[in-house]
Image (cartoon, rainbow, N blue to C red):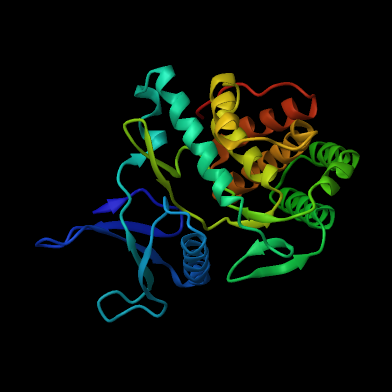
């Protein structure tokens, strides 16, 4: 049975005959075969460090098999479904415990440290020795892509000026940690108001934990003070000056969102991403998501 998956990989739930638990099979096209090795590496790292609310990798076929000639992985099926599919049906009070559990789970993930900053595959690709160096390279890469995809040149320059003006904040992060880097309602699973786990670690990086919190804030929390309060209570203490750093990281994620939408041909989303970027550059709070 097809399940919700990424835009490139495909995900299936397999229900065998007899007294055998269902499993998830994730299939990777040849052009992104390397993502299989990455997800297996991250999920097994999480398992070794005692993070249980993630899928467990049961079997891997990097070259495929005669019946399925593509790379694939077999994983345990977590109960429940994406929070994004039920969030509109939950009473406001029921979201508080869910977001509290989300904060606690992400805090657990962030206990896993790395020796350097960078993109994770089966280790750190192109490692950087400081967060300042890592974020300077990341902003440069995202803004170059923004220009290549046809982004407005004046807006690009305004983003670059903002990033340079706040670059001193990045040095406050001294230790990189495992960041899910896509921890939002579509990748968080719930059964009623119980968080059963999170999935999709294809974006994982070794970075400032506040980079991860900013992504959750941008894609899931936005203008909801109740969600933010519950999430941060669950997460635990944050360092001094965290809000200013999160604001810069949130802008970074908005640029990445514009790039991803443009490269995928989702032109209808671009005005909303631009609106978010302009709102953040003005220092104003984000409003709710607007569906294109």
Whole-percent x and y of residue 125? 68, 69
At x 87%, y 44%, the residue is 167
Whole-percent x and y of residue 20? 16, 62
Q: Is residue 93 visible?
A: yes
At x 55%, y 20%, the residue is 226
Q: Is residue 101 above or below residue 223?
A: below
| Residue placed most toward the observer, 110 or 272 | 110
Q: How many marks?
A: 0
Q: Is residue 198 above or below residue 55?
A: above
| Residue placed most toward the observer, 64 or 37 | 37
Residue most extreme to the left:
18
Q: Quadrant of residue 56?
A: bottom left
Whole-percent x and y of residue 26? 37, 62
Whole-percent x and y of residue 225? 59, 20
Question: In the visual, does 265 lie left or right of 154?
Answer: left
Q: Quadrant of residue 95?
A: top left
Question: In the visual, does 1 lie left or right of 258?
Answer: left
Q: Is residue 289 visible?
A: no
At x 35%, y 78%, the residue is 64
| Residue placed most toward the observer, 279 or 62 | 62
Q: Quadrant of residue 257?
A: top right
Question: In the visual, does 62 lie left or right of 230?
Answer: left
Q: Quadrant of the N terminus?
A: bottom left
């Amino acid at each position: 049975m097809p399940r919700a998956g990424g835009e490139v990989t495909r995900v299936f739930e397999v229900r065998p005959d007899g007294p055998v638990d269902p499993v998830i099979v994730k299939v990777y096209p040849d052009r992104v075969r390397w993502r299989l090795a990455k997800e297996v590496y991250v999920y097994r790292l999480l398992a070794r460090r005692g993070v249980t609310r993630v899928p467990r990798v049961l079997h891997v076929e990097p070259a495929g098999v005669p019946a399925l000639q593509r790379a694939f992985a077999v994983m345990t099926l977590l109960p429940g479904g994406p929070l994004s599919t039920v969030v509109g049906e939950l009473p406001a009070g029921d979201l508080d415990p869910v977001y509290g559990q989300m904060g606690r789970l992400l805090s657990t993930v962030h206990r896993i440290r790395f020796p350097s900053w960078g993109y994770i595959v089966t280790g750190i690709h192109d490692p950087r020795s400081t967060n300042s160096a890592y974020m300077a390279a990341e902003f440069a890469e995202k803004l170059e892509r923004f220009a290549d995809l046809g982004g407005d040149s004046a807006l690009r320059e305004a983003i670059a000026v903002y990033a340079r003006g706040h670059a001193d904040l990045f040095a406050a992060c001294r230790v990189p940690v495992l960041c899910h880097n896509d921890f939002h309602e579509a990748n968080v699973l719930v059964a009623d108001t119980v968080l059963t786990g999170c999935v999709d670690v294809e974006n994982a990086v070794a970075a400032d934990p506040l980079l991860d919190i900013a992504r959750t804030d941008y894609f899931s929390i936005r203008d909801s003070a109740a969600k933010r309060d519950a999430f941060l209570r669950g997460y635990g203490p944050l360092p001094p000056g965290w809000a200013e750093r999160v604001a810069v990281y949130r802008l970074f994620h908005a640029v990445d969102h514009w790039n991803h939408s443009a490269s995928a041909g989702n032109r209808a989303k671009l005005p909303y991403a631009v609106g978010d970027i302009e709102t953040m550059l003005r220092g104003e709070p984000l409003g709710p998501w607007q569906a294109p």
